[in-house]
Image (tube, rainbow, N blue to C red):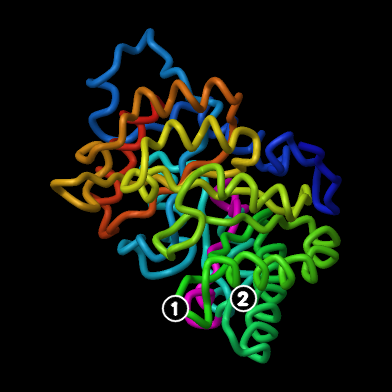
Amino acid sequence: MTTLPRPSGQLTEHGHDRRQFMLAAGTLAAGLAIPGLATAQSPATTPANRGRIFKSVKWGMIGAGSTVLEKFEICKELGFDGMELTTPGLHDAKEVRSASEATEMPVHGTVGQKHWQVRLSDPDPAVREQAREDLIVGLKETQSYGGNTILLVPGAVRGDQETHDDVWNRSIEQILLVLPTASKLGVRVLIENVWNGFCETPEQLRDYLDEINSPWVGAYFDIGNVRKFSPSENWVRVLGNRIVKLDVKDWGKQNGFCKIGDGDVNWPAVCEALEEIGYTGWCTAEVGGGGRERLAEIAERMNKVLML
């Protein structure tokens, strides 16, 4: 996939800021660890994906710490490499930048918070316009935090007035309109696969992204969400280098959404597929959060299943 330069730094092949990646890699090299990890792995053994895949947590999961800086510090202590924030309007950019610099914890991106209610696929043109404006605000806020991607749910199938074709066509129309802003800011729009009735096969999502045909749009692949439909590793291979970032969760026929590693996702097969496509980049937990102990457990489970 072709990449374009961004004002704040050079993009890697998967669209990440190289300075942020060097920062994260340096953090890993410094030997940060989470409790119990040293006893689970031989000191002489380096996990296969350490230094290639970087571990992050979504802001809403962090139940420990009372200030932005404290939350950054706690996540760094627990072995996370970076953070993913929410948008629009929930964070002070100066405070976020200060905490990020103080802890050497990059903000790699954001998640849009309004895209389920105010949808790019809504039957009402006025709502679609508002959804587009929300996306533009999100792009600007993401850049102000130092991030390089925003996660987007492009719409939802909601009946005769909002069919699969409607979601496809309406969302693409609106996304194309924001691409000049995305390219100017150096922030990519990443489409997440969710349970919205849209693109429930990897081939559909591949074709949707290919129709948009922009280096500023890619896939935010949720490993657990797709397990309901077909093996996650199949999606990885079909989407290939369209995958820019990963959401990490698990799902099983018996357990539903569950702790990472306790569902039906075949994690060794997923890791093999990620290696085949040459994936390097961010993986972000999207599970129930909590305090320090819960966050430590999440980090350890991510390390185990993704060989971090």
User: Pointer 2: what residue?
Assistant: 120
Compared to residue 133, the image places residue 112 above or below, namely: above
Q: What is the quadrant of residue 122 in the picture?
A: bottom right
Residue 113 lies in the magenta stretch: yes
Q: Residue drawn at (41%, 43%), measured in percent from left and top? A: 223
Q: Amino acid at mark 1?
A: Gly
Q: Is residue 207 above or below residue 118?
A: above
Q: Amino acid at mark 2?
A: Leu
Q: Does the magenta segment cover residue 268?
A: no
Q: Is residue 51 above or below residue 184?
A: above
Secondary structure, mark 1, is: loop
In terms of secondary structure, where does tag 2 sit?
Answer: loop
Q: Nearer the viewer, residue 49 or 95?
A: 49
- Residue tagged 1: 159
Quarter the N terminus occupies: top right
Q: Say which label, 2 or 1, has the lower sequence index.
A: 2
Q: Position of residue 26 (x, y in %)?
A: 59, 31
Q: Closer to the camera, 145 or 201?
A: 201
**151 left or right of 71 in image:** right
Residue 35, given in percent of the width and then of the height, sits at 26, 34
Q: Is residue 65 above or below residue 162?
A: above
Q: Nearer the viewer, residue 26 or 235?
A: 235
Residue located 30% across and 36% down the image: 265
Residue 269, percent across and down? Answer: 38, 24
- Crowd band around label 1 with a 10 angstrom C-alpha radius: few (<14), some (14–19), many (20+): few
Residues at marks 2 and 1, CA–CA distance in whole angstroms: 15 Å
The mark closer to the camera, 2 or 1, is: 1
> Whole-percent x and y of residue 14?
68, 38
Q: Is residue 227 left or right of residue 58?
A: left
- Identify the magenta region: 101-118
Quarter of the image holding residue 146?
Answer: bottom right
Tell me: 100 left or right of 61: right
